[in-house]
């Protein structure tokens, strides 16, 4: 990492962060989202009502199941039944010689 004094400085810095309830972590994302993720992380690190609203909004946005994990039964249950046409046209049938 570097010299022993640099290692000690980083260790002390991370210790101070932990005391404040913060943690360092690494995430992977698109390069174009870098600044947005940084700003979001800074805002979420604050203890403000705005941060709580943002936290709730993000949780709600990511709490849904992925589209590939939904069963056919769940899809059918969520289908609005008002637009179903369940009537069938009446047909006389065909004549058969026996």
Image: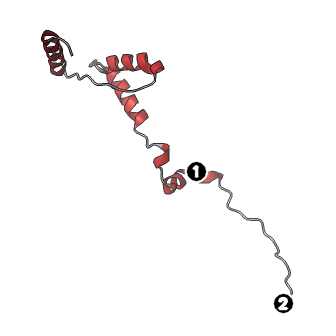
Local secondary structure at mark 2: loop
> Residue at point 86% right, 81% down?
95
Q: Nearer the viewer, residue 93 or 24?
A: 24
Q: In this view, does 61 lie to the left or right of 17?
A: right
Mark 1 surroundings within 10 Å by alpha-carbon count, few (fewer than 14), some (14 through 19), many (20 or more): few
Q: In this view, does 44 lie to the left or right of 76?
A: left
Q: Nearer the viewer, residue 83 or 19?
A: 19
Q: Which of 86 and 14 is in front in this view?
A: 14
As drawn, 91 above or below 51: below
User: Label 2, on which residue?
Assistant: 98
Q: Residue 61 is drawn in which quadrant? A: top left
> Residue at point 68% right, 57% down?
85
User: Label 1, on which residue?
Assistant: 80
As drawn, 67 above or below 86: above
Q: Which image quarter is the C terminus in? A: bottom right
> Residue at point 77% right, 65% down?
89
Place of residue 10 in the rendered image (x, y in percent of width and height, measured from the top left): 18, 14
Q: Residue 42 is drawn in which quadrant? A: top left
């Amino acid at each position: 990492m570097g010299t022993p004094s640099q290692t000690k400085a980083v260790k002390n810095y991370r210790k101070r962060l932990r005391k404040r309830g913060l943690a360092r972590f690494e995430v992977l994302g698109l390069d174009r989202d870098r600044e947005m993720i940084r700003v979001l992380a800074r805002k979420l690190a604050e203890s403000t009502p705005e941060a709580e609203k943002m936290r709730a909004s993000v949780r709600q946005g990511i709490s849904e199941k992925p589209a590939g994990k939904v069963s056919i039964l769940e899809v059918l249950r969520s289908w609005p039944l008002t637009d179903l046409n369940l009537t069938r046209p009446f047909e006389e049938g065909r004549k058969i010689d026996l």
